[in-house]
Image: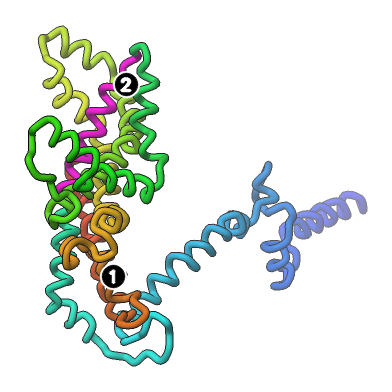
């Protein structure tokens, strides 16, 4: 009888012991569990030894580089745009919005802006379409097609300075182009490719196109691999020609690649410098008539004697806003196309 009374008490005591939670871990112990290696509560497999800070540890070098070489220079440029800082350092005074007011009244700034925008308006459509047409041509598996793919890509490997020097030799008054045209009796006097402001700008655009065709051709070759061949075969059986298939099958199939190429080319066109410098000399064409915004920033902001780093920074902010507007416009067009 005593055993019968004792057993329920013992069972009840055991049940009450299991239901009562143990003491809560201290703050130091919780911090140690979060930071130090060891099995994480409620996890299994490899996740038991994974901590929340581990992904940040792997990405820390990239984050540090982005902050040091990207975020900090950008913020520093914005701050300098409100000062009259000099290129070689020294005391900088706060001038408020004077640099931006000066920029709006500066005819040279608007000339550089016109050249940059015109450069983008001409180069971007051509750079979107020409590499696509080139990719369609070299996509076919024909004998010797590998040679042509390599030849079209070769300008990408060359330095911009080397390419600019080559084009100087080609387009000079006594260069290869003018010599051939004169010997073919197509012209009497040499064409001033490197002395006329408009021809310098157009020649620089041609250099940009020639050097970038092979690079963006590779983009399109990758995109064309995702276009179903059955669509072309069905359209050909229905009597659609090559041009019609290109417009209604190829271009819609690679529209995302076209948007990407357009965005990258637009940003690069607004930042063009080397082409103008190599073909228009260090002055940016006769009287600086072909200077783009990066070229103008170098002249007004980095000259060690007459330069004003504050004003150059203000022009840099304007270039950033122009580039940002182009990028947002491209994204909006992409969304509208997907909708």
In which quarter of the view is residue 70 placed?
bottom left
- Nearer to us in this view, 190 or 159: 190
Whole-percent x, y for residue 57 in the image: 61, 58
- Residue occupying the point 20% across, 61% down: 285
| 122 within the magenta span | yes
Is residue 127 shown above or below 221?
below
Is residue 90 shown above or below 214?
below
Instruction: Identify the disc placed on residue 61.
Output: none
Instruction: Identify the disc placed on residue 297.
Output: 1
Q: Mark 2 falls on what kind of element?
A: loop
Q: Earlier in the sequence, mark 1 or mark 2?
A: 2
- Whether residue 77 sits left or right of residue 102 in the image: it is right
| 295 within the magenta span | no
- Residue occupying the point 36% across, 84% down: 86
> Which stretch did the figure color magenta?
121-141
- The residue wearing badge 2 is 139
| Main secondary structure found in the magenta portion | helix
């Amino acid at each position: 009888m005593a055993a019968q009374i004792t057993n329920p008490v013992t069972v009840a005591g055991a049940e009450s012991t299991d239901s009562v939670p143990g003491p809560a871990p201290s703050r130091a112990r919780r911090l140690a569990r979060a930071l130090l290696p060891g099995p994480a509560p409620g996890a299994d497999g490899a996740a038991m030894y994974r901590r929340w800070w581990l992904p940040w540890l792997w990405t820390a070098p990239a984050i540090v580089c982005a902050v040091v070489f990207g975020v900090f220079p950008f913020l520093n440029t914005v701050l300098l745009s409100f000062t009259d800082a000099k290129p070689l350092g020294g005391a900088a005074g706060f001038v408020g919005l004077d640099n931006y007011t000066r920029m709006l009244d500066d005819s040279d700034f608007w000339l550089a802006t016109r050249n940059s925008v015109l450069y983008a308006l001409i180069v971007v459509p051509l750079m979107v379409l020409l590499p696509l047409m080139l990719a369609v041509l070299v996509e076919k598996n024909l004998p010797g097609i590998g040679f042509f793919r390599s030849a079209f890509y070769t300008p990408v490997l060359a330095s911009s300075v080397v390419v600019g020097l080559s084009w100087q030799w080609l387009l000079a008054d006594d260069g290869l182009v003018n010599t051939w045209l004169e010997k073919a009796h197509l012209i009497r006097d040499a064409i001033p490719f490197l002395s006329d402001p408009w021809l310098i700008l157009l020649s620089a655009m041609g250099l940009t196109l020639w050097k970038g065709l092979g690079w963006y051709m590779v983009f399109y070759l990758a995109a064309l691999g995702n276009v179903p061949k059955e669509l072309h075969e069905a359209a050909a059986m229905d009597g659609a020609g090559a041009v019609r298939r290109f417009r209604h099958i190829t271009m819609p199939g690679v529209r995302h690649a076209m948007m990407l190429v357009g965005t990258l080319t637009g940003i690069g066109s607004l930042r063009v410098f080397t082409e103008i410098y190599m073909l228009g000399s260090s002055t940016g064409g006769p009287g600086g008539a072909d200077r783009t915004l990066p070229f103008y920033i170098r002249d007004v902001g980095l000259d060690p004697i007459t330069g004003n780093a504050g004003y150059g920074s203000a022009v840099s902010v304007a270039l950033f806003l122009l580039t940002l507007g182009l990028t947002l416009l491209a994204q909006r067009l992409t969304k509208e196309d997907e909708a």
